[in-house]
Image (cartoon, rainbow, N blue to C red):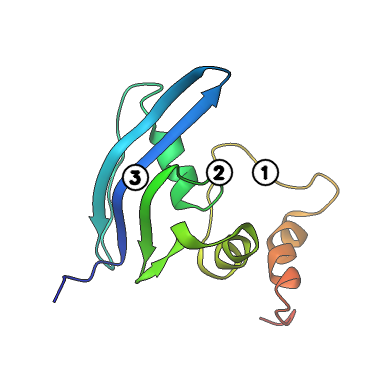
């Protein structure tokens, strides 16, 4: 029986292709995080940290490999499934303010809840 990890990244690869040039941004990265655990991703500028986070957050897709969240394989999901997974399971803290200028802070916080059909009282 294999050990169960809450987040598991297996042989993660991300390539960017422009014309005849292929840039290997992530090359067979493996790691796991157990429930309640945390990790730090460190490295030089351009080493793939943001690319890994974008893949883990389902904002970007991988070229190869697998990412599991509590045994759910997000690498096999289509865009609609990833969007639904992201809305129901993930939260984001951005470096820049990603708020809608026309909404108040409260309205910005409530917007994702309203889109998912949550009651206003919650």
Q: Quadrant of the N terminus?
A: bottom left
Q: CA distance from mark 3 to mark 1?
A: 28 Å
Q: Is residue 70 left or right of residue 80?
A: left
Mark 2: which secondary structure? loop
Q: Position of residue 100 (x, y in %)?
A: 78, 47
Nearer to us in this view, 112 or 50: 50
Q: CA distance from mark 2 to mark 1?
A: 7 Å
- Crowding at mark 2 (Cα within 10 Å: few <14, some 14-19, many 20+): few
Quarter-of-image position of residue 71: bottom left
Instruction: Quickly name the residue at label 3.
Output: 12
Q: Is residue 70 left or right of residue 57?
A: left
Image point (75%, 79%), residue name:
120
Image point (69%, 70%), residue name:
113
- Nearer the camera: disc 3 or disc 1: 3
Q: What number is the disc on residue 79?
A: none
- Nearer the camera: disc 3 or disc 2: 3
Image point (71%, 82%), residue name:
121
Tell me if residue 48 comes above or below residue 4 in the rendering: above
- Crowding at mark 1 (Cα within 10 Å: few <14, some 14-19, many 20+): few
Q: Position of residue 111 (x, y in %)?
A: 74, 63
Q: CA distance from mark 3 to mark 2?
A: 23 Å
Count of all numbered marks drawn on residues in the image: 3
Q: What number is the disc on residue 94?
A: 2
Mark 2 and mark 1 in contact? Answer it, CB < 8 Å: yes
Instruction: Quickly name the residue at label 1.
Output: 98
Mark 3: which secondary structure? strand
């Amino acid at each position: 029986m294999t050990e169960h990890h809450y987040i598991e990244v297996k042989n993660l690869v991300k390539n960017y292709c422009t014309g005849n040039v292929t840039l290997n941004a992530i090359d067979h990265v493996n790691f796991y995080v157990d429930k309640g655990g945390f990790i730090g991703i460190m490295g030089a500028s351009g080493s793939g940290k943001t690319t890994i986070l974008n893949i883990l957050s389902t904002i970007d897709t991988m070229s190869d490999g697998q990412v599991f969240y509590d045994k759910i394989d997000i690498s096999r999901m289509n865009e609609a499934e990833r969007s639904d997974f992201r809305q129901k399971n993930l939260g984001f803290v951005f470096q820049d303010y990603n708020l809608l200028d026309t909404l108040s802070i409260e309205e910005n916080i409530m917007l994702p809840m309203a889109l998912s059909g949550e009651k206003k009282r919650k």
